[in-house]
Amino acid sequence: MCGLCGIFAPRGGAEGPRAEAVSKMTARMVRRGPDSQGAWHDAEHRVHLGFRRLAVIDPTPEGNQPMLSADGRSALIMNGEIYNFAELRTELEGRGHHFRTNADSEVLLAALTEWGHGALDKLNGMFAFAWFDGASRSLLLARDHAGIKPLYYAVHGASGTVAFASRLDALFDAPWGRPGALRPDALHLYLRLQHLPAPYTLYADTHQLEPGHALTVHADGRLEMREWWRLAEDPQTDLRGDAALDALAAALDGAVRRNRIADVPLGVFLSGGVDSPLVSAIAREQAGDRLEAFTIANPGWAQDEGLDAARYAKALQLQQVRHDATAAEAVAAVDEVREAQYEPFADFSILPTLLVSRLAREHVTVALSGDGGDELFFGYERPLSLFRAAREFSWPWPMRAARYALRRALSSARPSDVPMHRTAGDYYFAVNSRLPADELTRIAPALRALPEDLRLYDSAPYRGARALANFSRVAEFRGQLQRGLKKVDMASMHHSLEVRVPMLDREVIDVSLRIDPLESLARGERKGELRRLLARHVPAEIIPTPKRGFAVPLGEWIRGPLRPVANAALASPALLGVGCFDAKAIRAYWARHLSGEIDAKWGIWTLMTLSWWLERTE
């Protein structure tokens, strides 16, 4: 795991400012790569690259980046890991390539030289990279299939110069200074979703490269974007029952085996749920010896996972390293949260993720996590709720609205409002909005509309329950997963820890798409296949049934020890100076939370993190 940055000025410009800018951009990423620093430039073609390395595979100096071609005309910088690099290396050696290191980055450079853009579909890993091709004098920026590793870029309108980096805030050091003006529509999107999904950022002319996308900056300055991978929206399902479990077991075994390849110490995150215990079980079986597992607990809290994680550790014979989080620690960690966020980010589970990353880094350099299991195997309530409403979604919306009104009138119990949304996509956007539209209208009356080109939760007309289930997986993959991956990258890189996600291995994804989604959903199950697979490794009775998120008691902490911090953030001139907020309405919103009238922890935390970001970037 590393940090990369660079500037490409195909139309020219002052050499000195570009070199100085890349040096500053690189310095911002020392936590992403504490082991070494590298730089490369080609004055003739006006390209500068900067790199910070966290050495994991071939940690010798020979594995340092930028990685250069034999003739010195092409250069690669890569953040992440290519898990199938050994197979690719063998194939490339058969085509006449010779390697001087054991690094996966050198294999990627050779693959790009051999196959160009076609190399992307051969890669199984997590990555964001920049490749300057001396032959075509072009720059290729690419991001992995699932969006595990971040990549931001900015285009200077006057010159056509492109700056890029692993951190959004590194783009503030571009030769033209800060990014463009704040985008009001992107601000609205952030307040609703707690983060900004790709391709959006808060700033004009600044973007996130989308997962599974590649951007080519040609020698004449033209930009060419193409999508090289996307999650299938209507997959063919041919796996059911034991056949599905066996195929999934084989895929996960291969994925964990690939993810365990490292030349540095490796451990696992261990929660009390299903996904990370399953990854831990497979890793322990493969390792055959001591394997450290890291857990954050909240003793005395209803959602504490400490006891369940301890049961897993005992059953799997893991060497568990546990830390009990406290309210006092949360107050102390606020500065760490601010520093770790390289873009505004309001998922408060970054707190325990920072804590478990810090804990793990005291022992290992690489940790395996279970991220991706919920999104691929229907682990949340949202897909089940949508599935239960499938029949009603086949009706015209006015009929659904009339039926809902009748049921409200005739029953004392509140009926599900899922069918009240006009489309499945509308439901997903609403249920993922942490600041409801009515509250947002009160506290930000001058807020502008959402981006016109927003397609995050676009859904096709109703085509049956299976299509609805497939849509829910795509919606989770594009929505919840991207927020979760961003959180893990921020928290782990703040502590120079590489976190790998075997559940998002391309072979595992392929198998998940082949499993009939109706098998579990029809039984009202969440992650039915993963649970049954985990039961092959541990006693079934220790697998908890309720879904619990990786969280801390933030609502209690905000009302208690974090209250002064929240007071200051909500009254910050940086926040209120944006111009769309009503200070009186924010105070009223905050008072209602403090009194217990409403549970507004998500909305309060969203405003707090935005306030901190604006203060940092003034």
Image (spheres, rainbow, N blue to C red):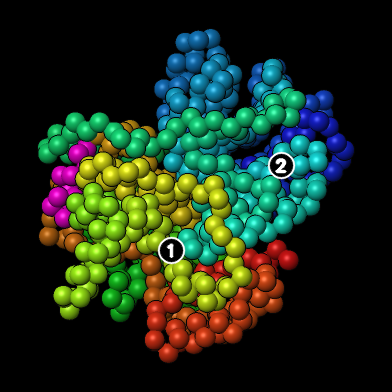
Question: What secondary structure is the magenta-colored segment mainly?
Answer: loop
* Image location of residue 597, percent across then percent down: 39, 86
Residue in the image at 43% along x and 55% along y: 484
Crowd tier of the residue under label 2, counting other residues whose Cα lies within 10 Å: few below 14, some 14–19, many 20 or above: many
Residue in the image at 46% along x and 68% along y: 437
Q: Which residues are magenta?
A: 515-525
* Image location of residue 86, percent across then percent down: 44, 25
Mark 1 or 2, closer to the camera:
1
Crowd tier of the residue under label 1, counting other residues whose Cα lies within 10 Å: few below 14, some 14–19, many 20 or above: some
* Image location of residue 367, percent across then percent down: 42, 50
Is residue 199 rendered magenta in the image?
no
Query: How far is disc 1 from disc 2 in space, using C-alphas?
Result: 30 Å
Is residue 522 rendered magenta in the image?
yes
What amino acid type is highlighted by mark number 1?
Ser
On the question of residue 148 being in view, the answer is yes
On the question of residue 110 being in view, the answer is no
Q: Decide which of 201, 92 is in the foreground and name it.
A: 201
Residue lying farthest bottom? 595
Question: Label 2's element?
Answer: strand
- Whether 301 is drawn above or below 473: the answer is below
Q: Quadrant of the C terminus?
A: bottom right
Report which residue position mark 1 lands on.
Answer: 433
Report which residue position mark 2 lands on.
Answer: 155
Residue in the image at 37% along x and 48% along y: 475
